[in-house]
Amino acid sequence: MQELDAFRARARDWLEANCPPSMRLPATEEEIVWGGKRARYPNPDSKLWLDRMASVGWTVPTWPEQYGGGGLGPAEARILEDEMRRLQARAPLTSFGIWMLGPVLLEYGSEAQKQEHLPKIARGEIRWCQGYSEPEAGSDLAGLKTRAVLQGDHFLVNGHKIWTSYANYADWIFCLVRTDPIAKKHEGISFILIDMADPGVRTRPIRLISGASPFCETFIENVQVPVENLVGELNQGWTIAKRLLEHERRMIAGTGERNRGDGRALDELAKLYVGESEGRIADPSLRDRIAQQSIDTRAFALTVRRAAEEAKSGAAPGPASAMFKLYGTELNKRRLELVLACEGTQALGWEGDGFAREELVATRAWLRSKANSIEGGTSEVQLNVIAKRVLGLPD
Amino acid sequence: MALVLSSDARLVRDTAQQFFRDKAPVEALRKLRDGRDPVGYSRDLWREMAELGWAGFVVPEAYGGSDFGMVGLGLVLEQAGHTLAATPLLSTALIGASALVLGGSAAQREAHLPALVEGRLIVALALEEGPHHAPHRIALKAERTPAGYRLSGEKRFVLDGHVADLLIVAARTADARVVLLLVPADAAGVTRTRTLMVDSRNAANIRFDHVEIADEAELSGGVDLLDAVLDRARAGLAAEMLGSSTEAFERTVQYLKERKQFGVLIGTFQALKHRAAAMFCELELTRSAVLAALSAFDDGSNEAAALASLAKAKASDTFFLVSNEGVQMHGGIGMTDEHEIGFFLKRARVAQASFGDASYQRDRYAALSGF
């Protein structure tokens, strides 16, 4: 206990001394630092903050020190989170390398792969994207067709990936590929790492209902990938794929918590746009829905915390991560529907002077949120996972 | 606030689980119902529970209790919920004990708590006057007399009221204050009528005709005491409902794995799988909410009231959902009295209505949250 108190004091002092004042404000969408070779830093403090945090391993606090991490145990990591929240310090680095690839490399990667890739993720030098879905392989992910043919010291890869988030900004892609076209569909898949600098890799952004283009199509044509970029065993990629999805689900489940749209609480919005009487939201039906939402949000947060406390230290998320993905995303969608219900037609603007900036941000966040229950496995897929792997219901 | 159980707490849970499975299965409730048992629960079993210390979990050691706390009592209630055991745990070990501990004078505590802890005193809170929980809308009159109060009015839905030895009566004075008064159940002018409820548990309507009581019968704290006691009742009942919901859910999932139609197990149908998975999520959230509420009392957190309403709201919605789906997924057999799933449906509605249903709790949660 004393050691933890000492760590808290150290972390607090260090953060106080090293977190630039402008990094103690919420980041706008454009200010979020994703790293990579083409990273831009509209605010130079962002780069300073990233480098300082990376120098002590705190962009990835729980990773081992030899791979650029902070080597912290779960209790210390929670303290660091607490202390960052206390300062309202923003995350120095946000990336799929941190959330998804890093944890599976730590579990399944070779020593050479860990040494090559993990420090670059930790320092924000390389930005990764995820090559999972294909036009014919969405919820049925294992039906993927991208081919990788082993030819001596390399694979020759050909295929078409879709919904590759931010592929147009990424340097490398981790990919599920078919390495045995005859085996059963789950048994012929491998997990490989591809350098997108290869001219055979092209990306095309897809415009979404929100007007933004966070997702791309990625075309892979006759790209040679060295065999040392195979993670785990040949044809055993599905196991890694599922584990990575568990990390992804946990990440998406926290979307609502991290990205609260315009940051204003629902009850304040309701009072502002609908009015209040004697301190209560004037519309009793809306008030009840907001109370329901607050209750479920709180109960969900308590459940996330309980799962963390119950988990053995450092244990990877199990099938219950499907519940967090399902509930977290459905809650976030409900919350943004309530933002619309509060703001009325002021939440239905597309652009222009008739609407406040926060109103326009909320509208786009509402549209964006519809993808929450599709990406990383639809809500229906999560229900299947819970039914099968948690409840043991028969196929 | 810890959301994982200590080893002591796990021991209590395991002991309680074994106890209720062995001694008070759902079959026992059926027997009490079918035999039109005048007491409605087993007095022998209640003495055994008291010997295990459960009646004294929220009572200080000075009065024979263990002060083990709300989490511990909640775990016992949860296990009682699994078998729908009819016991005075809620009326006496939780509500009666809390009222005396929080609002009792030294003399009141000394007079009642040791007997309560030993299982010799059953206590009932006489609060409700209408068909909906409305703890601040009390009309029962407490008129001043030279030596105390004279009570006139009626109470309904008094849990364990027909067998209680001591009533805690919520009354309104001439100057519109709410007072909680200790009234012996056999006092002159008290008329009790047992009400047979759909869940086969025990309640009574009670008339007070010019019941004379002394000043010493008043608990201190008034409406604040009432709210504090009700918050504990909500959290404890939510724990019991969590146990019942979990049991109804597990029985239903088991049935999906056994029942065949169209030549296959009905658990292979996605329409049922998805509904089962959705219930699992609600149960997990309810469990977290209940544990947070119970530990908030033990920690003396100022969020205890909000968390109690949160837990009761979640537990009410979840028990409603699971009990309805339980009957539906059991199909025709679920409609029979012979099958036990119907007992859970009946208990669900009574438990939902007790101390405020989900909509009442949401209103209160919103008020406590400032909107």
Image (cartoon, rainbow, N blue to C red):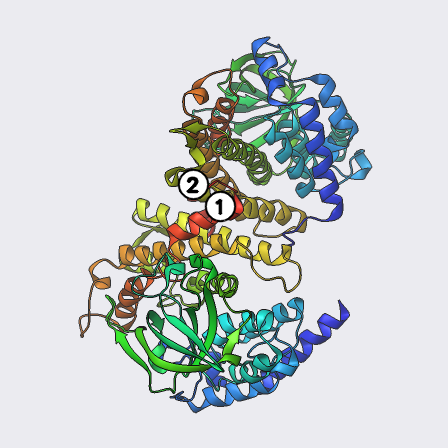
Q: Considering only vertical position in the picture, is B121 above or below B361? A: above
Residue at position x 48%, y 52% from top? A323
Mark number displayed over residue B289:
none
Q: Chain of mark 2?
A: B
User: In the structure shown, which secondary structural element does the residue marked by tag 1 occupy?
Assistant: helix
* B299 with respect to B347 (left or right): right
Instruction: State the image quarter where residue B40 is shown.
Output: top right
Q: Is residue A177 left or right of residue A2?
A: left
Per the image, the residue denoted by label 1 is: A388
**A221, above or below B18, in the image:** below
Q: Amino acid at mark 2?
A: Lys
**Label 2 secondary element:** helix
Taking depth in this image into account, of B177 and B36 the one nearest to the observer is B36
Q: Amino acid at mark 1?
A: Lys
Q: Do dots 1 and 2 share one subunit?
A: no
The relative height of residue B95 versus residue B208 in the rendered view (above or below) is: below
- Residue placed most toward the observer, A345 or B96: A345
Q: Does residue A7 appear to the left or right of B273 in the view shown?
A: right
- The residue at 54%/56% (across/down) is A304
Whole-percent x, y for residue A174 in the image: 44, 74
A371 versus B74 height, above or below: below
- Chain bearing tag 1 is A
Instruction: Please identify the quadrant where the C terminus of chain A is shown.
Output: top left
Image quadrant holding the N terminus of chain A, namely: bottom right
Tag 1 near tag 2, CB within 8 Å: yes
Residues under labels 1 and 2: Cα distance?
A: 8 Å
Quadrant of residue A182 in the image? bottom left
Q: Is residue A2 visible?
A: yes
Point out residue B228 in the picture as x, y percentages from the top left corner: 59, 40
Numbered badge on residue B273: 2
